[in-house]
Amino acid sequence: MAATGQVDGAAWVAGALRASGLQGAAFAAAQKRIALVATARRHRGAKAVSDANTKWDQLSSRFKNSWIGVVILALIAVAAVFAQFSGLITKIWEGPPPAADLRRIEPEITPLEKFSDKVTTVGSDTIYPVGATFKFALVHNGAGEEAINIGGLDVRVDGFDADAACPFSLTGDRIFGAGEAPLRVFTVHMADGKVSSVQYKPAPDERMKRGKSNNLLDTEDAPPLRLRKTGDETEAIKVTFIADDAGRYRLGLSVRYANRDGRKTATIPSATICKPRE
């Protein structure tokens, strides 16, 4: 279209000159003058475009080489990186998930079957004749994926009074008889205010294992206990205390374990056991 317009314009100018009546040298001079004007106009248009391009190149170069330009480019790059890794940055800021831990231990404490009718309440304390049984479970709380290593199940003697009187009396024909043991059953005999012996029955069809330590897991051939989030995340335990000598005991248990945060101890509330003198 532009080329066609230029041709039509030149033809129109030539026709106008012929119509003007100019002849000879005057016609040639007018035609040359018009040609020079057209050439000048075309040159000014190209130069204007060239000048515009030159100014843009100068502006772009000045932007790239200026501190403001560098700062703006750097900010754009940082924003792009931040957007790409925002999820990772959030995780790092929030830190790792909480470590796996034991749930709160709430024991069920029951009297020995042979002496269940002699249980006595004095004030806010319940006194169990001769002994008592603690039933509880060690349970993974489901936080984190790591296992919890149980390092010890310790007998805790919170109190002992060899001269204390019991609020009940026992006849001589009462004896303690043990039934068939479920999984992880401990029978702990107390004397002189401390553990005198431990019997551990891992399962009904396994032989009795023995120990003498306050740590009930410190018995012969005792495997380590480990709680995981899934599968065997619960360990049901039964501990029966029996007082072999007269006196009043205040007995409890402590669970030593380790998780990602280090070593910890969970305390199981204690109970009062009393054996009267014969």
Image (tube, helix red, strand yellow):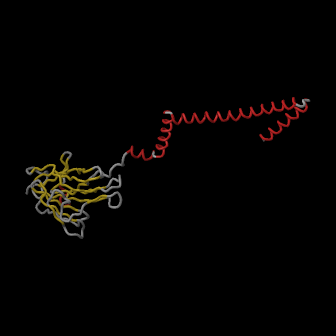
- Total tally of numbered discs in the picture: 0
Q: Going 48% across and 39% down the picture, which residue do you hit?
A: 74
Q: Nearer the viewer, residue 171 or 87?
A: 87
Residue 191 in percent (x, y) is at 10, 57
Q: Going 49% across and 43% down the picture, which residue do you hit?
A: 80
- Quadrant containing the N terminus is top right
- Quadrant containing the C terminus is bottom left
With respect to residue 223, does 100 lie above or below? Answer: above
Q: Nearer the viewer, residue 85 or 55?
A: 55
Q: Going 26% across and 53% down the picture, which residue do you hit?
A: 258
**Horizontal side, residue 259 vs residue 52: left or right:** left
Q: Nearer the viewer, residue 91 or 39?
A: 39
Q: Going 50% across and 39% down the picture, which residue do you hit?
A: 76
Residue 254 in percent (x, y) is at 21, 52
**Horizontal side, residue 69 vs residue 202: left or right:** right
With respect to residue 273, does 36 lie above or below? Answer: above
**Horizontal side, residue 2 vs residue 260: left or right:** right
Q: Looking at this rendering, what residue extends furthest in the bottom direction? A: 205
With respect to residue 68, does 245 lie above or below? Answer: below
Q: Say which quarter of the image contains residue 86.
A: top left
**Horizontal side, residue 11 vs residue 213: left or right:** right
Residue 67 in percent (x, y) is at 48, 33
Residue 256 in percent (x, y) is at 23, 53
Q: Looking at this rendering, what residue extends furthest in the front direction? A: 25
